[in-house]
């Protein structure tokens, strides 16, 4: 059965009216509980795989991966309203892969676990690794001012005060370029996204847009901005003499042995993939497929394509010390608070250098998330990289808000959060979150428009 189009009615208030302060939450995860048992079983393709022959490596606490629970929990995401999702879960040498729902809501083509997927801001981890490799070689100073390397692009006081480290942990005070790069998107998102589908954007132009925009936070305070990682890519180009995408491919992707991870050379994904539907909080209704898109607008901040299995391979090698030296990995895992907690609450998310740590109900985990038009991704691991989950899904900005821009109940977000936490713990499904990321704590999964900006 074809799932319903994005739930909730099309907002009847006039579209495009800007909210007053739009610096708060991009996505607030998991408030409630998804029922452990669903009324009807859903199609889930599941593939157990093993990295080595013989008996599989036992999981955390002496238990193997609970495939039945993983299958049911993944299917719950589709039942909650997500078009489709695919995931890879790993514990030691044991692996499980699954898929649920639809890759194409019109033809009812099914999801597959091995699909290629746009991974959005997870690209930032790869870019940070590349920069830190150059730090190790002595070509970049982590605490050197960015103006030393890019004086014409970042001159003056900002060039002297903003360091490379500040770019990588988003404490530079530099604003995001994405809204200025898509003028008119707030007023008519469907039209603007469609008109820019095949538009080529230059990274220096994107960086200048972000540098010219009013800062959203003072320097030294974490404020997530894609401009930081466009500048990091331009920094790589300056010190290596190569296009940053070429350098990252040769020195990070190939070094990690990833076979299905790449910067796309055209607006099209080269391998098998799902359609990727953008809803823009209901302002694009029905949600539209943007799986074909020129990703130069995201560049070294968010353009990459990968598979869920490749993402697990990458983060296991990274956290295991195989891609960076000990000093650089320690620097990457040196974090700052990613949000200001409410009174009496704790910080549940901290951001390092292209890598964050987040507290889930079952513990603290390392990784990143990302989303571009129609494609959302999670990749989280235990600190040693032994227990991992990567998940992709194909409907973004599915959240709905009331007349006062307050989030409505979010069954999809609840199911996503519960699946990820359960996959990282012994139980295939977790109980209700005891601690969840506070509003505004997550890097922008949606990387374009915050909920409060569309009314």
Image (tube, rainbow, N blue to C red):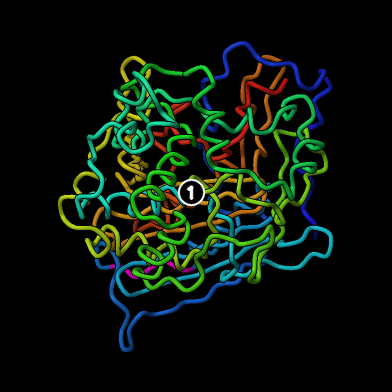
Report the side of 413 relative to 187 (left or right).
left
Query: 364 above or below 14?
Result: below
- The quarter holding residue 324 reads bottom left
Report the side of 211 relative to 107 (left or right).
left
Q: Indicate the position of residue 281 as horizontal and vertical percent values.
A: 70, 33
Secondary structure, magenta segment, majority class? loop
Q: Indicate the position of residue 3 as horizontal and vertical percent values.
A: 77, 53
What residue is rendered at 84% in x and 22% in y? 12
Disc 1: CA contacts within 10 A as few (<14), some (14-19) or many (>=20)? many
Report the side of 166 relative to 303 (left or right).
left
Residue designated by label 1: 300
Residue found at the far bottom of this picture:
54
Query: 79 above or below 45?
Result: above
Front position in the image: 150 or 45: 150
- The quarter holding residue 287 reads top right
Question: From where the camera sits, is residue 251 visible?
Answer: yes
The span picked out in magenta is 63-67
């Amino acid at each position: 059965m074809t799932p319903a189009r994005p739930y909730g009615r099309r907002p009847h208030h006039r579209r495009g009216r800007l909210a007053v302060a739009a610096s708060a939450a991009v996505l607030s995860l998991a408030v409630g509980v998804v029922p452990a048992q669903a009324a009807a079983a859903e199609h889930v393709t599941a593939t157990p795989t093993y990295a080595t022959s013989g008996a599989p490596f036992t999981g955390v606490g002496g238990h193997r991966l609970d495939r039945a629970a993983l299958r049911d929990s993944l299917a719950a995401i589709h039942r909650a309203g997500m078009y489709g999702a695919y995931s890879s879960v790993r514990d030691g040498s044991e692996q499980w892969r699954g898929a649920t729902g639809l890759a194409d809501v019109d033809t009812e083509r099914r999801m597959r676990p091995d699909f290629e997927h746009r991974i959005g801001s997870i690209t930032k981890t790869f870019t940070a690794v590349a920069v830190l490799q150059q730090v190790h070689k002595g070509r970049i100073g982590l605490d050197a001012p960015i103006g030393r390397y890019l004086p014409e692009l970042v001159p003056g006081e900002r060039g002297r005060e903003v360091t490379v480290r500040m770019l990588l942990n988003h404490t530079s005070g530099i604003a995001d370029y994405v809204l200025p790069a898509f003028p008119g998107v707030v007023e008519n998102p469907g039209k603007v996204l469609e008109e820019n589908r095949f538009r080529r954007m230059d990274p220096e132009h994107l960086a200048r847009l972000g540098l010219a925009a009013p800062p959203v936070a003072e320097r030294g305070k974490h404020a997530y901005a894609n401009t930081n990682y466009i500048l990091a890519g331009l920094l790589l180009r300056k010190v290596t003499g190569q296009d940053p995408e070429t350098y990252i491919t040769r020195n990070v992707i190939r070094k990690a042995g990833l076979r299905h991870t790449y910067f796309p050379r055209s607006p099209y994904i080269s391998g098998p993939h799902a359609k990727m539907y953008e809803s823009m909080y209901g302002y694009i209704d029905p949600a539209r497929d943007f799986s074909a898109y020129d990703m130069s607008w995201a560049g070294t901040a968010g353009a990459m394509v990968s598979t869920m299995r490749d993402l697990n391979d990458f983060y296991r090698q990274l956290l295991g010390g195989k891609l960076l030296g000990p000093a650089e990995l320690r620097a990457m895992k040196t974090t700052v608070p990613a949000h200001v907690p409410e009174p009496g609450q704790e910080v549940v998310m901290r951001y390092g250098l292209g890598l964050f740590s987040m507290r889930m109900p079952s513990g603290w985990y390392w990784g990143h998330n990302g989303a571009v038009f129609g494609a959302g991704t999670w990749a989280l691991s235990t600190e040693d990289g032994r227990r991992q989950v990567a998940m992709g899904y194909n409907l973004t900005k599915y959240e709905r808000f009331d007349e006062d821009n307050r989030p409505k109940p979010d069954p999809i977000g609840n199911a996503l959060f519960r699946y990820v936490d359960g996959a990282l713990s012994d139980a295939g499904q977790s109980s209700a979150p005891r601690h969840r990321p506070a509003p505004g704590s997550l890097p922008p999964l949606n990387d374009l428009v915050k909920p409060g900006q569309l009314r």
